[in-house]
Image (tube, helix red, strand yellow):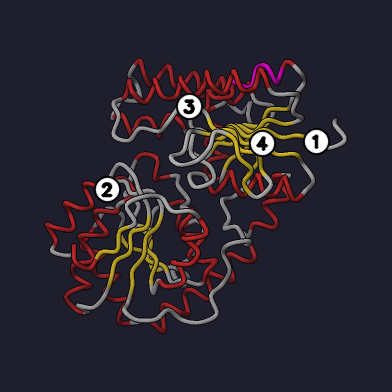
Amino acid sequence: MHETPRVLFLVHSEYPVGEPRVRRQADAALEAGWDVTVFALASEGSPVLEMVDGVRVVRSSIRRVRDMSAMGMVREYLGFELAALRFCAREPFADVVVVANPPDFLVGATIPQKLKGSRILLDVHDLMTDLFESRMGSSRNSLRMRVLSLLERWSWRFADQVLTVHAPYGDEILKRSGGRVSPLVVMNSADPKFFSKRTIGPPPPYTVGYHGSIMVRYGVTDLVEAFASLLEVDPDSRLALLGGGDGYPDVIAAARLAGVAHALDLSERMLPVETVVERIPEFHLGVVPNRPGGLNRFALSTKLLEYVATGVPVVCAGLETLRGHFDDDEVLFFEPGNPDDLAAKLVWARAHQVEMNARAEKAHMRYTRDYGWDANKLVFL
């Protein structure tokens, strides 16, 4: 190894705004004495090369395009793969290359570094075939999905080590690989550099909050519909939706249909973590409205952990993985995909704020004991 070890991160996303997990890992490596470089998508208004908090960031010419066709998505992934391949070929030897999925097959871009002796880590944020199935609406038995499944398994075996975000994903990877790949779990914990427990309660008006990707499959339109019931009992309440994504037009349409557009606080784009951490303590209630089915059956929402770490009470979809990490006396669950039940829980939470704060305290204790970043950082390093 070099006197100062080097690590490269490849991420098909904007950095630092688009990938808080990669930022957390990059910062941890930097603090541990590594020389850190991130290769990412182009970002509007950002230079091709810059230093971000000590991390060297190199941006490709490839930009993310929203609302694209399946073939458009494939072209974007392949374009970034070729750009990353060229980047890895011209970069000096790195001791470790960390590839953030999706797509898993981005590990192919590390071949020039692997030939030099680099150790390749594939960090599975989402199961690629499940993600593509939900985005493309393809059958799992279709030719397209069978090819993706082969690429997924090849990518896992190509990497020297696979990481993933929680145990249910780890179990599924172990199963799909026929027992050949046993991932390490590095949870999507809230970064303690940014997220800490608030010391005072939020000011009025009563604010329900959601931050992150604005997508229909994450139940954001269900939240907008359900919020109408809360607005009937508390006309001054607000719904803050902080993020951007493909579902933004659907949210606007749902808000107009439900008659709640005047009570919405919309950021219209993804926000830097520095802005998000200023806004979350203003929430009286955080909501994780994921719909059932598809990729969501495995998802452990990062926003859930960030609300809990901040001490914000949570109303959450009662999906198996989410219920597997918190109990009923810590989080208020609703029936996934049921806007009426979500509405009832929002109204109940507004009327029982003392009970919700008690839940939040218990959830924070669980998070600190079992899910905090300090322990997970050691696994990553």
Q: Which mark is residue 248?
A: 2
Locate the C terminus by quadrant. top right
- The kind of secondary structure the magenta stretch mainly shows is helix
- Counting residues from the start of the chain, the first of labels 1 and 4 encountered is 1
Above or below 322: residue 21: above
Whether residue 173 can be seen here: no
**Residue under numbered circle 1:** 5
Residue 308 placement, left or right of 67: right
Q: Kindly report which numbered mark, 3 or 2, lies closer to the viewer in this rendering.
A: 3
Judge the density around disc 1: few (<14), some (14-19), many (≥20) Cα neighbours within 10 Å. some
Q: How would you rate the neighbour count of disc 2 (Cα within 10 Å): few for under 14, some for 14-19, many for 20 or more?
A: many
Q: Gap between marks 2 and 1, in whole Å?
A: 42 Å
Which amino acid, by three-letter code, is at mark 4? Thr
In percent of width and height, residue 277 lies at 50, 64
The type of residue carrying mark 2 is Tyr
Of callouts 4 and 3, the N-terminal one: 4
